[in-house]
Each structure stands twice: as structure tokens, then as C-alpha cells.
Image (cartoon, helix red, strand yellow):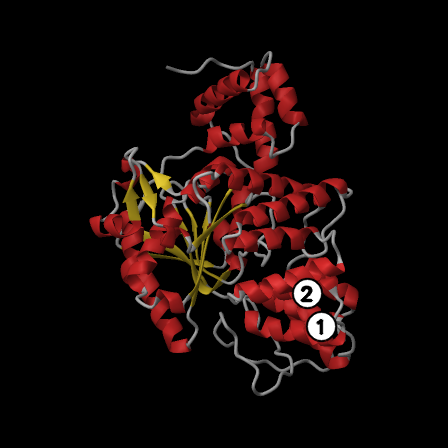
Amino acid sequence: MPARALLPAIEEQICLLVRERTGIRIHDHQMDTLRRTVADGLARFDHAGEADYLAALRAARASSPECEHLIAGITVGESYFFRDQAQMDWLREQYLPRVIARRREEGNLSLRIWSAGCSDGQELYSVAMLLAELLPDRERWNLHLLGTDLNAAALARALRGRYSEWSLRATPEAARQRHFHHERDHTWSISPALRGHVRFAYLNLREDSFPSMLSETTALDLIFCRNVFIYFDPAIVAEVCAKFHACLNPGGCLLLGASDLIDSAALRGFTLRGLDNAFYLERHDTTPAIVPAAVPETAPTRAIEPPRPQVAAQAAAPAASYEDITALLGREQWREALAAITARQMADDSGALLPQFRAKALANLGRAREALEACDASLARDGDDKHSHFLRALILQELHRPQAAEESLRRTLYLDRNFVEAHYQLGLLQMRRGARQSGLKSMKNALAIAERMRPERRLHDAAGRDHKRMAAILRHELRMYEADSGGKR
């Protein structure tokens, strides 16, 4: 039965508000879902009428219950494990074995995968199950499996990892027996071992910045973004695709859904490939090679990307100014920034800032071991620089050295108790290490600081993010973790 129509002006304004905040465009065939969600919101939050509800949405933060209920209602999507069998077969039989074999040859046992728009987590858990099959030496590998969404309720369900029989309808019996436990209420829960291999986080593809080591979206081998673009305008799709391209290693792949019909102009830098009924987009590298800085002979090689051909520096080119370099870093143009830093270091390698800048660019390009060396060089020149200690903590997390990362975060907070990003990262790290209550306390500390700062004040270590946006993200993530009453880590 169709939902009761809203007043046309109210309906238009709600659609506009959703589009402005999330980039989601509500199409005609989704209007009935919107009307049902609004009707439920009117009753749930005790609003007197549609105009009162709209006014509350306009005044509310993006993380308010009303806004989260609305977004959850219009983006709800039924999913299940091992969805799109052709793509899953391609991953199991072609792509993942090829990448794994190459990494073994390189002596680089790492894989980085992102499920963007992960909903309840079935997609990311399916990939984790494939990797459990393909990696008999799983514990030797540095696996980064990230799922993000803008629906905090869905993320809480993903964290909890409990699913209906219907969600397992395409799950192979061997995977069901190995990775699930049948509960008394006839649901199926993901094994703690598998849940420990994945991470879920709040991220808005329209508003938030990526690639960034803060959101753990750098140097990726594979991105899933299936049946997400159906909600977006073509201009936003093109913008997100360009960012996905920057997130991927050369040769990395982007998997879209069957419903994601995209203009070819939005896919610059990608090559469309197919095998039977499985289609994927492969990044081909269109960026120039970077001049490497002078480093000792024993310095580690690049951890993620294959070596690039060296090109000679143009001696006549003037070295970039500090202002130019900080502007490139602020715009997250990591390759350009690294080239500018290298040129500047050749002309003037004094002080602690240049190696700190170099560490930041390298870390965001996925070259974690080189980044750690640069960061340590910066700290050797100025051991009390809080930003270098914070950067070092992020790099150490990438290298799976949690104890050392926590020590660097605590050193950062010793130098500045109001360092919002350090409290936030400490909270995430504590929860991953099983200290749930301490982690929630650290995240609440971060939120309290963000809320008392000037909202428009930019964060030094998070490009394009101010305290208002940081506070919104923290509220979403706290809601996600606090709702996960059954999924303690």
C-alpha cells in the first residue's frame, strides 16, 4: 500500500536537505520509501506535523537521531553474503590469488581492501572469508579490511556480526561451518576470529576526505562500492571516482554494482575489464614518476607500490617554498607534495619540518616504512613536536605495531592535552586492543574537546576537516559503538 503523500513543498525541502548533507538524490521510485520513513519519524520523535519535522531536521546536527533515522530509512538495502557470485568467483579464482602470489614474490605480505557503503558488513566479511581460504599463513599477513558507511545503525549491526538465515542464502556450507555460530534465536553470528580481522567506521563519501591515512583509505588494492552510486548525481559520482582512483595502488581495482550505470567520463584513469559476467575497473597509472630523496643505501624499499623509474631532477627548477608545500599537503596532492619536498630538501635540508612533511606525504602514498624513517628524522631534530609524534603513531598503526603506536599517541597528548585527533585515534586503538571502555572514554574526551573549540577552526592533521565536522564524526562513531551492545572487541 503506497505511503501517504507529503505536502509538495515539504517533500521538496526534505529531498534538498538530504542531497546537501549526503549527496544522495532521491529518485521518483524511492519517494514511497521516503514518505514511509518521514511518517515513522513523525511518530517516533513526536513531531506535531510535517513542518515541525522539517524544522527539526534543519536545526539538527547530522548525527542527531532524526537525521540518522531519515538517512537509514532511505538508504536501507537488503544484502547478503557472497552477493554477485560472478564477482566473488573472480576474486577467489583470479584477482586475489594473483595479488597474493605477487606479494609473496616481493616479500611484502600485505593487502588493503575497502568496502565503501558497506551497510551491515556482509560484503567485507565475505572477502575476509575468501582470504581465510586463500591464506593458510594468515597470521603472517598485514591485512587491512575496512568497511565504511554513513548509516550508524547499519555499522553497529556490522560490528555486532549477527545475521538472519536469509543473509546466508548464498554462503557455501564450508564457510558457514567454519565462520558462523548458530544462535538460539535462529540467527547466525560471525566468529570472533573473523570479526577481529575487519574494521568498520563512519565515512560520508560526499563530505569526508579521502585518500587519507586518518581514514585508512590510502594505498588500496581493492575498493568495493557496489550499488551506492545509484543514489548520487553524475557530478558527485565523478568526484568520488576520482578520489577512488587516488586511493588505489596502480593496478588496483574498483568493483561496482550491476545497478551502477556511470558515464565513461567519470572513469578517467580506469580501464574497464571483464571476465565472463564479472566486470571491474583497473587503475592505470597516469601520474609522473617522483624524484626519490637521497637516502642511505640500507633504507627499506617501498612497502606497497612497485618501484618506479627514476627521473633526473631539473636543476634549473626553483625549489618550492614552504607555503607551496603546505598548500599541496592541504589539498592532499601527495605525489606533487613529495616532489616539491624532495626539491626543497636538495636546496635546504635544515630543520624538522621538511622531514615531517615528507613523512606525511609518504604515509599517505602507502610507503609506511619510508615514512617512519622520515618521521624519526624529524623527531631527531625536534623531539617535542606533537604533530610528528602523532604522525608517527599513525604510521606505526599501519605497520601493525600497536604498542609503539599507543606510546606515540600518549606522548602527543602529554605535549597537548587538547589534541582532538590524538584522543580519537587512541580510542580506536584501545578498542582494537580489547580495551573497550578505555576506548570509549578516549573518544568521548575527543568529542568534548571538539565541541568546546571554535566550530570553524581547521584541524592541523586532517585536511579539509574542522572541529564541527570532527564532532559530527565522533558522535556517529560513538553511537555506532554504543549500539553494538553484543559486539565487544
x then y, percent, for residue 164: 31, 36
Which residue is labeled 2 in the image? 389
Q: Residue at x 54, y 56 (%)?
A: 216
Q: Residue furthest left?
A: 173
As helix, strand or loop, the secondary structure at mark 1 comes to helix
Q: Amino acid at mark 1?
A: Leu
Q: Are marks 1 and 2 in contact (CB under 8 Å)?
A: yes
Of 278 and 373, nearer the camera is 373
Q: Residue at x 50, y 29 (%)?
A: 26
Q: Residue at x 56, y 80 (%)?
A: 310
Q: Amino acid at mark 2?
A: His
Asked whether the viewer can see residue 261, the reply is no
State the CA–CA distance, disc 1 to disc 2.
Answer: 8 Å
Q: Which callout, 1 or 2, points at the residue further toward the start of the chain?
A: 1
Location of residue 16 by image quarter? top right
Asked whether the viewer can see residue 479, the reply is yes
x then y, percent, for residue 19: 57, 33
**Dot 1, crowdedness within 10 Å: few (<14), some or many (≥20)?**
many
Residue 379 is labelled as: 1
